[in-house]
């Protein structure tokens, strides 16, 4: 029973979740404005310009999130092939962290221009924290890559 869950199954599950996230993100591109209009009808106190004010920052968050998921899928493909400690993967982790920082910046803009500031504050804080974690992981992978290259050249 201890071999029920292995690293291969974990990688497959991670890829399935990433593909699901990509699908939801792409669906969100088409359904964001109707969703915002629905929210406005339920909470008219947000103001008539709510949809116009919130749509821009939320679209920026979606686009950056979709980019991060696509980069993550590329990274997972390399990991499944056993190519973990590579310069390409370090670059991908850096790009994922940049996507998170871009989401945080879009949320700061959303805090300034849109009424549901709590939504933007929450998304921005989560994205900022995840970006910080990505930077730490990137630094660990980069250090491991350098150690691996050093070991490869040692006889």
Image (cartoon, rainbow, N blue to C red):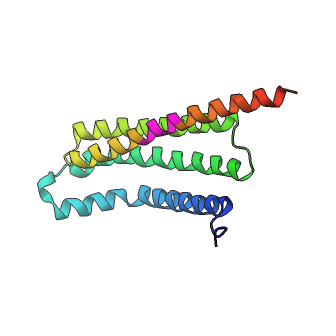
Question: Farthest bottom residue?
Answer: 1
Q: Which quadrant of the structure image shows residue 111? A: top left
Q: Which residues are magenta?
A: 130-136
Q: Residue furthest left?
A: 45
Q: Position of residue 150 (x, y in %)?
A: 76, 26
Image location of residue 116, percent across then percent down: 21, 49
Residue drawn where x is 54% and y is 38% of the image? 137
22 inside magenta stretch = no
Residue 125 position, x and y percent, is 33, 41
Location of residue 35 (image quadrant):
bottom left
Q: Residue furthest right?
A: 155
Q: Residue at x 69, y 33 (%)?
A: 145
Query: What kind of secondary structure does the magenta stretch mostly adopt?
Result: helix
Q: Residue furthest front?
A: 2
- Asked if 59 appears above or below 15 in the picture, the reply is above
Where residue 151 appears, as percent x and y from the top left, is 78, 30
Residue drawn at (50%, 49%), measured in percent from left and top? 66
3 with respect to 32 (left or right): right
In this figure, what is the number of numbered marks? Answer: 0
> In which quadrant of the rendered image does the C terminus lie?
top right
* Residue found at x 70% / y 36%: 86
Q: Give the image quarter of residue 30.
A: bottom left
Which quarter of the rendered picture does the N terminus lie within? Answer: bottom right
Q: Is residue 60 left or right of residue 88?
A: left
The foreground one among 125 and 37 is 125
Residue 133 belongs to magenta span? yes
Q: In the figure, is residue 25 to the left or right of 46?
A: right
């Amino acid at each position: 029973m201890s071999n029920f869950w292995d690293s291969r199954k974990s990688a497959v599950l991670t890829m399935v979740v990433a593909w699901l996230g990509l699908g939801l993100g792409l669906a969100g591109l088409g359904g964001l404005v109707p969703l915002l209009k629905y929210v406005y009808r339920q909470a008219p106190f947000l103001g008539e310009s709510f949809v116009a004010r919130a749509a821009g920052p939320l679209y920026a968050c979606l686009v950056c999130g979709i980019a991060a998921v696509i980069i993550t899928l590329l990274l997972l493909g390399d990991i499944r092939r056993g190519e973990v400690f590579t310069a390409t993967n370090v670059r991908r982790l850096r790009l994922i962290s940049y996507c998170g920082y871009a989401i945080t910046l879009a949320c700061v803009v959303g805090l300034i221009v849109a009424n549901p500031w709590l939504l933007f504050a929450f998304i921005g804080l989560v994205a900022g924290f995840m970006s910080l974690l990505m930077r730490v992981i990137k630094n660990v992978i980069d250090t491991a890559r350098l150690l691996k290259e050093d070991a490869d050249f040692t006889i």
